[in-house]
Amino acid sequence: MLLDTVRNTIQTHNLIEKGDKVVCAVSGGADSVCLLHALLNLRSEYQLTIYAANVNHLIRGEESDYDSNFVKRICKAADVELFYREYDVPKLSKELKMGTEECARMVRYEFFEEISKKLEGAKIATAHNLNDNAETVLFRLIRGSSAEGLCGISHKRGNIIRPLLDAPRKDIEKYLRENNIRYVIDSSNLTPDYSRNKLRLNVFPELREIFPDAERKIVNASRFIKEDNDYLNSLATEFKNEFSEDGYFRADKFNDLPECVKRRVAHSFLQKWGASDISAQNIEDFINLAKSESGKEFDINGVFYAVKVYDKVVLQRRKEKEEFVREIKTGETLETEDWKITVKTASQYVKKTSNNIAVFDAGLLKGPFTVRYRKDGDKMAPLGLDGRKKLSDIFSDAKIESTKRDFIPLVEFNGEILYLCGLRQSSHFKADKYTKDYLVIEYYYKGMRKNEY
């Protein structure tokens, strides 16, 4: 019966083709040992080359060593080549500041991928079963997952295949008993120390008392969710392509979408921009960002964040504001990796073709000048306006993104802001019909596109 289930899963989901190389991930537990034996029974039918892989995470001391030695013995008896690796997961998880289970999973799959490449694209078979899938769906539901998470474990993901995914644990245990197949028991699975174990040991037995075959019902529901989700994702992709570019999207267009599509578009942006472990709350917070006022932010990860900039949501790389104060004299150029400023004199009036040039009366300004970034409370007297104005208001009027404002230089003379680079020059020291020599400040922003400021 179990072999029929595995065979049907392989055919329905096109997991294996004749002549494939398949690496079976074997921990020594019931599921993985059953998977290895099932694949060996189907080897001639599919003309497979079977390998095995085992990772000793060094979490349970002598018990971990015993399990790995057990896997070595059964692979030797079955004449199956075994790839073996040890990782000190307790130590590594502390160094990487990760949970033990998360770290163990990471190193396992890194090892599997290494083997697959070595064997020129071999498929990796893992022993997830129907009960695992039901536990995953219920766990994600309680935690507050998106619809994406409620789709459960997939039969195939890249070169990872799961031939046992439609087999309930009771059928696996029955297969092992009937064929007198030995396996080891991981003691950590028998203690309710982890959330998943609590579901398995405490919640599901109670559910089965109320609803026999509860796991299969949960998995069936998750597959219905997946079908709906796949269709809505296709709609979301169509809409997203209409109003997004690399690194930003139009918030007004996004806000007009139906909520069910909006959530999927939000999930795709978060995923594309590097967010991990995306929850339903993350998605709602991201949706609210698109509705918020300009300047609001949403943390993506340690490197990137999203920020509302007027009618757009923009992906930004974190950049620490630096303390920058430099002196520049007439005839000199000051340059950073982002911009360049030149101060020079001219005997004739220099026509301003853009805000990247500021022109003053050189007779009133002898220098040296100070170049710095803005400080709280900075004001200047913009040419063409009466009185002084806060730099923050000038930035807002020009619709400069909040994330850029701390990195736009200004030129100062004796405490007076002469020039907010690329935006406004001061009305003080301005050139007029009596000016004989002109002081010209030129600003060049290296990432500038036409009319960026």
Image (cartoon, helix red, strand yellow):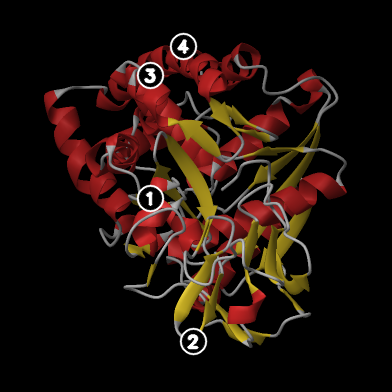
What is the three-letter code of the residue carrying label 2? Asn
Residue for badge 1: 396
Res. 338 visible in picture: no
Q: Earlier in the sequence, mark 3 or mark 4?
A: 4
> CB under 8 Å between callouts 2 and 4?
no
Image height of 223 relative to 201, above or below = above
**Where on the picture, by quarter, is residue 226?**
top left
Query: Is the residue marked by circle 1 packed among few (<14), some (14-19), or many (20+) residues within 10 Å?
Result: few
Question: Callout 1: helix, strand or loop?
Answer: helix
Q: Earlier in the sequence, mark 3 or mark 2?
A: 3
Real-space Cα separation, disc 3 to disc 2, in angstroms: 56 Å
Give left or right: position of 388 versus 231.
left
> CB under 8 Å between callouts 2 and 1?
no
- Residue at 33% in and 50% down: 296
Give left or right: position of 384 versus 282.
right
Comparing marks 1 and 4, which lies closer to the viewer?
Answer: 1
What is the three-letter code of the residue carrying label 4? Tyr
Comparing marks 3 and 4, which lies closer to the viewer?
Answer: 3
What is the three-letter code of the residue carrying label 3? Val
Q: Earlier in the sequence, mark 1 or mark 3?
A: 3
Residue for badge 2: 414
Query: Is the residue marked by circle 4 packed among few (<14), some (14-19), or many (20+) residues within 10 Å?
Result: few
Residue for badge 4: 231
What is the three-letter code of the residue carrying label 1? Ser
Give left or right: position of 384 versus 356.
left
Q: Earlier in the sequence, mark 2 or mark 4?
A: 4
Q: Earlier in the sequence, mark 1 or mark 4?
A: 4
